[in-house]
């Protein structure tokens, strides 16, 4: 069982988080420690990621004013200047959240969306620094351990479609000498494979371009797969057919680890425009 333990990398990170709780708790339903600090993975150079959670009605009424108030207070408070001095990128990243999670429309070349990542980072891997009325717990009860099997099948079919679309383009672009476009397509397909992998296992991810070892090895328990993912990007000659071979290998991994859900056609029952 993967159990993240929150930890601050410096006293300055801890002091900044405590100041935020003392100042902003009366204006929120929960204050969440997010990302690397919440999982005990931060370094002195890490930012301090904080989520201010408001119920949707309070978010609609107060989010803009809360963000403006935060910006003014942050600019004039010494504890945040001390945080910036603690590490190269040590600063507060603060987001106001409403807990209204929903898939968004995707484009064909933009890589994976953030639907599962947002739920994972806000509800699974977050650490509550303060709560007022149990809204965070209500959200966890709604979305955990995972969303519905019907949505899972729909999402998996959709993600596979985008992944396969990127892989299908690579041989065509390689034949035209568009080798850097091939690399871009392989990278996006790799991230979409990770999205499909987590969906197929009903586990929420952290990221598709960071903390890959932590997720694939520690959370999913797939060390052999991690080694294969590393090998995908050990490309010795970009202008050869090597990247086409890598795309085929990723296609095999997709079918082995995140196959098409039963009851869905190859397009996943989703109406979409023709891919570029």
Image (cartoon, rainbow, N blue to C red):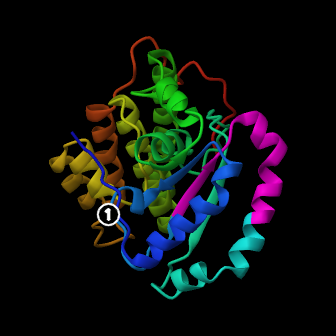
- Determine whether 46 is above or below 243 in the image: below
Q: Secondary structure at mark 1?
A: loop
Residue 111 percent location from the top left of the image: 54, 50
- Determine whether 144 is above or below 39 in the image: above
Q: Main secondary structure of the magenta part?
A: helix
> Was residue 129 drawn as part of the magenta stretch in this picture?
no
Tell me which residue sits at (42%, 50%) in the image: 206
Residue 265 percent location from the top left of the image: 49, 17
Residue 5 appears in which quarter of the rendering? bottom left
Tell me which residue sits at (54%, 83%) in the image: 84
Q: Residues within 10 Å of mark 1 (few under 14, many from 20)?
A: some
- Determine whether 163 is above or below 187 in the image: above
Residue 209 percent location from the top left of the image: 43, 59
Tell me which residue sits at (59%, 34%) in the image: 133
| Residue 266 visible in the picture | no
Residue tagged 1 = 233
> Was residue 65 drawn as part of the magenta stretch in this picture?
yes
Q: Magenta stretch: give its range.
A: 49-69
């Amino acid at each position: 069982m993967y159990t993240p333990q929150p930890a601050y990398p410096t006293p300055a990170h801890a002091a900044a988080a405590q100041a935020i709780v003392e100042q902003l708790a009366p204006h929120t339903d929960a204050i969440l420690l997010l990302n690397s600090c919440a999982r005990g993975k931060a370094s002195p150079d890490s930012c301090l990621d904080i989520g201010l959670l408001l119920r949707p009605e309070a978010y609609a009424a107060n989010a803009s004013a809360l963000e403006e108030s935060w910006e003014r207070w942050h600019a004039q408070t010494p504890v945040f200047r001390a945080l910036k001095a603690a590490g190269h990128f040590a600063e507060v990243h603060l987001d106001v959240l409403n807990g209204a999670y929903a898939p968004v429309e995707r484009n064909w070349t933009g890589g994976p969306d953030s639907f599962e990542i947002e739920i994972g980072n806000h509800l699974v891997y977050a650490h509550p620094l303060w709560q007022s009325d149990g809204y965070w717990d209500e959200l966890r009860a709604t979305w955990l351990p995972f969303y519905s099997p019907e949505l899972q099948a729909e999402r998996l079919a959709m993600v596979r479609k985008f992944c396969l679309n990127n892989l299908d383009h690579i041989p065509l672009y390689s034949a035209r000498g568009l080798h850097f476009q091939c690399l871009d397509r392989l990278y996006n397909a790799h991230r979409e494979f990770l999205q499909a992998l987590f969906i197929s296992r009903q586990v929420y991810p952290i990221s598709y371009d960071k903390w890959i070892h932590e997720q694939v090895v520690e959370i999913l328990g797939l060390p052999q797969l991690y080694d294969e993912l590393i090998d995908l990007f050990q490309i010795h000659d970009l202008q050869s057919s090597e990247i086409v071979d890598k795309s085929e290998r990723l296609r095999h991994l997709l079918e082995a680890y995140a196959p098409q859900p039963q009851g869905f056609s190859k397009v996943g029952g989703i109406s979409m425009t023709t891919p570029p």
